[in-house]
Image (cartoon, rainbow, N blue to C red):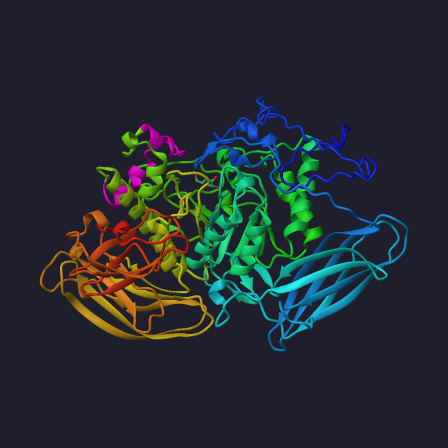
Amino acid sequence: YLNGSLLGRSENMFHEAVFNVTNKLRWGQNNTLAVRFDPPLKRLNPENPFKSTWGRNPDRVFMRKAQFGYGWDWGPRLPTIGIWRPVELVRHRIGALLGTQFNTLRVDHKNNTALVMVRVEAMRFAGDTPLKAEIRLALPGEKKPVLFETLTLDQPGPLQDPVAYFTVKNPKLWWTNDLLGSDAEPALYDFRVTLRKGKDVLDVKEQKVGIRTLTLDQSPDPDEPGTRFFRFVLNGVPIFAKGANWIPADSFVGAIPPEHYERLLVMARDANMNMLRIWGGGIYEHDVFYELCDRLGILVWQDFMFACAMYPENDNRFINEVDAEARYQVRRLRSHPSLALWCGNNENQWLHERNNYDKPWEKVPGSLYYDVILPGAVKELDGVTPYWPGSPYGGSDYNSMEEGDRHNWWVWHGGPPRRFGEPVTADHSPEGVSYRHYAEDFGRFISEFGMHAAPVYETLRRVIPEDQRYHHSPSMDHHNKDNPKNKGDALMESVTGLPEDLETYIDFSMIAQAEGLKFGIEHFRRRKPHCSGALFWQLNDCWPVLSWSLIDYYGFGKAGYYYARRVFAPVLASFKEEADGGVSLWITNDLLDEFRDKVIVRLGRFDGDPVWEQALEVKAPENFSGEVRRWTREELTDPAGGDCNGLYLWVRSAANKFPENRHFFAAIKDLQREPVEPEMEIRQVGEGELEVELLAPANAYFVHLTHPDENTRYSDNYFDLEPGDRRVVRVTNPKAALNPAEIHLGWR
Ligand code: BMA
């Protein structure tokens, strides 16, 4: 209401509400803008004709609001209402820019040029006078632009949307952070469109853009007949997507400070992630998210906001809302160099087919959006970024190993693979949910897979009352939204055994998650290019919770975060167990340069001297994964007759070209080893900087430092220490002084 008269209504948080106030404003006087909110649950429809949203609050689907707010398996039910993005009063005369688009259509590496496309969408409110759109593209800080062109908007009618193509010479290409080479940051250009009538400036839109091509290759994979690739191709180079799924960083999505985004996304980049998937049960993120991804070289897989449900197709108001939302979001996000994919929804086709496997002809209610309206908006208003109908999607069971992307919930939720028409089975036993099932996953692109781990003790201390700080206390179970509450116990049983107290629970659950993640990602990366992506479920949390996250609500990294950092490194050396009991060593090289180094491999005894050590000259081509050496079962035994569970394999690069790695011959709980306490010496280097030197007489496992401030950073953490290996960890805190007495050392 403006000055008491109704301006309009809004019932969709996913697009802007714009109202023309020209004739309602009182010039030179005070004006009163009033907004009335319905109670957040008032418009929910309890009479949901769809029997199933698979247990997750069926009423939510009628509201175009963040679906997780009604409760999720990692988030509390906190339905919100309010204004969550800025309110602006904007004045336009004669004409205004509705949208601008910048995309790269082709990069010609040979001639060092790029073909770019610019679209200008303008409104002319008054008259038919031709308007001009001035287009400027420049590297930041450079006076001379690489493009300076003018388009004339002289069509009859109010809407003007010309498209023009230009060639940029010597383009500086935008790359993901793993492929930057010697450049410190991905190249970004300043793109500006100025709308003019004669000399008069009517409107200006400015944005950072990048020059890069990005396509989705789904051609047949000649080496695995009957399958198709699902891989992103950046500037002509097929890449392996390394990263995680992103959920809203808070239950209250309007109040997340930009620094919080910066912290989480810098941590993602530092963990060598080159892609994040914005999951469909949350929000189209705030601008700062995409701007940071552009700057940090992280690609964005963007879901449309539909998740784990059937959505109404028989209500025209709802259909119009979805259309308006799609058009708004596509216009808003299409020019970000980080934007890699538009995706119709999260799990809707897959879950519907599982629930209706005996009625294979039934399409999921909502396919009107995923098959028609959303791809229509992407084609019309973007036309360059690929569209994919759902996640997972493609092939048989919509969660196939032969085509498309795949969610692996075999591990953790216990759902083994199936095909269209087959009944659904589940196995929640320790064997059934074991992370070793990842090795049986021959999917093309694994867009979800994960396991729970507790957050660090400090996080629990902040939210769990003291007398409730034990595994499965009512309060701890309340901070676990998955059901049943003991799924993690089945997983831990197969990895570490069951925990006895809070401290072992924290460590054991973190070990189960971190080792599982390492095992899965190594397998998926070795399969490059047949598998071309591994996005872990989930990067972050929206409240303090026991969940699949790698970084908890306050920003503390779990063990899995540091494991991810190593296992996502651009060059990975990993061991693979062979069916005959032998072990092979693989190099996975995501870089665009050949790998060449001396590689040291050791068969060690947990309690002391190695059995053998070998130095190998290893070469691996650019953008490649393959076996470089193999050892037989006999070569991996202890001549002194020791149990093979008392041995481990270890690998290191002489020139430090990949993170150290190791292989155990059994689950952690079955290893023949004694916990080894490392010696620690702490040196104060500056107020907020410590050097922590660690040294262990024998192999020390799960060595980690903790500190009660989430701003404290570690150059490495949660690692193994080789006998006699002196390791220095740099501990820094940009915000507070560090006191050595507050550093806690842990090991297992
Ligand atoms: C998938 C996701 C989420 C969910 C997660 C863990 O189903 O898409 O909906 O939170 O797994 O169960």
The quadrant in which residue 326 appears is top right
Q: Residue furthest top?
A: 47
Residue 599 placement (x, y as % from top left): 29, 72
Q: Residue at x 73, y 43 (%)?
A: 89
In the image, 76: left or right of 506? right
Residue 220 appears anywhere in the view = no
Q: Nearer the viewer, residue 281 or 217?
A: 281
Residue 193 placement (x, y as % from top left): 73, 60
Residue 283 appears anywhere in the view = yes
Q: Is residue 568 magenta?
A: no
Q: Which residues are magenta?
A: 474-497
Q: Nearer the viewer, residue 426 or 88?
A: 88
Residue 254 placement (x, y as % from top left): 56, 40
Residue 486 placement (x, y as % from top left): 32, 34
**Image quadrant in which the N terminus is located:** top right
Q: Residue at x 79, y 65 (%)?
A: 150
Q: Residue at x 69, y 71 (%)?
A: 145
Q: Nearer the viewer, residue 309 or 206?
A: 206
> How many labels sit on residues?
0
Q: Residue furthest left?
A: 640
Q: Is residue 489 magenta?
A: yes
